[in-house]
Amino acid sequence: METRQQGLLDPEPVTEVDEEMVSDVDLNNTMTDEEREGILSELTKLEEEISTLRQVLASKEKHHSELKAKLGITPLSEFKQNFNKSWYDMQTSTAYKKTSETLSTAGQKTSAAFTTLGTAISRKFGDMRNSPSFKSFEEKVECTVSNIKQTKVGSQGGGGSFEEVLSSAAHASAQETPSNNMPESSDHERTC
């Protein structure tokens, strides 16, 4: 017989199986009555052991709950304890610490930004108040209030109530024209 090295593509020779070997294999897998009885006996023992273990487990669980009741441990307290432990574990985790630090930094930056914004707004209002336009407006308002007070004092002999002064100011401003036709009655009115 010639020995030849086979490659990957070369077909492998088919070998014939001995007929005697095929007849030795029991395809029905039949067992004897003794083997069957042994297996049934083992199965029965396992079922009994499982039943016994379930009874023991039930007894242990009952004893466990009785001990907890004596200690005052309720399901709610267990839940709280588990929650607290989980919360502590989460707080000590690296991810939580990094997130907390990031949020803290963001909060500080936001606070600084609002402080800067508030300072800028205050500065702008201060600049606006010191502007010539605002000063002129402020002087006109002061003059109008002074004129109204003088008009009330001159016509009624008394100052009148605040509401009367306001209604008279509204009435007077409604009658005025933009050309500033105010009657000249005193030196103070002329300077306004």
Image (cartoon, helix red, strand yellow):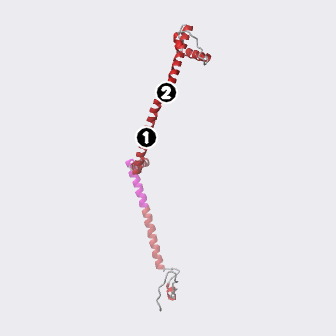
Q: Can residue 113 be seen at all in this image of the molecule? A: yes
| 100 sits left or right of 28 in the view | left
Q: Which residue is mark 2?
A: 128
Q: Which residue is mark 1?
A: 109
Which residue is at a point 52% across and 13% down the rendered structure image? 191
Per the picture, the main secondary structure of the magenta-coloured stretch is: helix
- Examine the rendered structure and indicate whether residue 166 appears above or below residue 18: above
- Examine the rendered structure and indicate whether residue 100 appears above or below residue 167: below
In the image, residue 37 lies at what x, y percent?
A: 47, 76
Magenta stretch, residue numbers = 55-72
In the image, residue 164 lies at what x, y percent?
A: 56, 14
Does the magenta segment cover residue 21? no
Q: CA distance from mark 1 to mark 2?
A: 28 Å
Q: Please name whichever residue, 128 or 164, is drawn nearer the observer in this view of the structure.
A: 128
Which residue is at a point 52% across and 21% down the rendered structure image? 136
**Residue flagged by tag 2: what amino acid is it?**
Met
**Residue flagged by tag 1: what amino acid is it?**
Lys
The answer to which of marks 1 and 2 sits earlier in the sequence is 1
- Examine the rendered structure and indicate whether residue 178 appears above or below residue 71: above
Q: Secondary structure at mark 2?
A: helix
Q: Secondary structure at mark 1?
A: helix
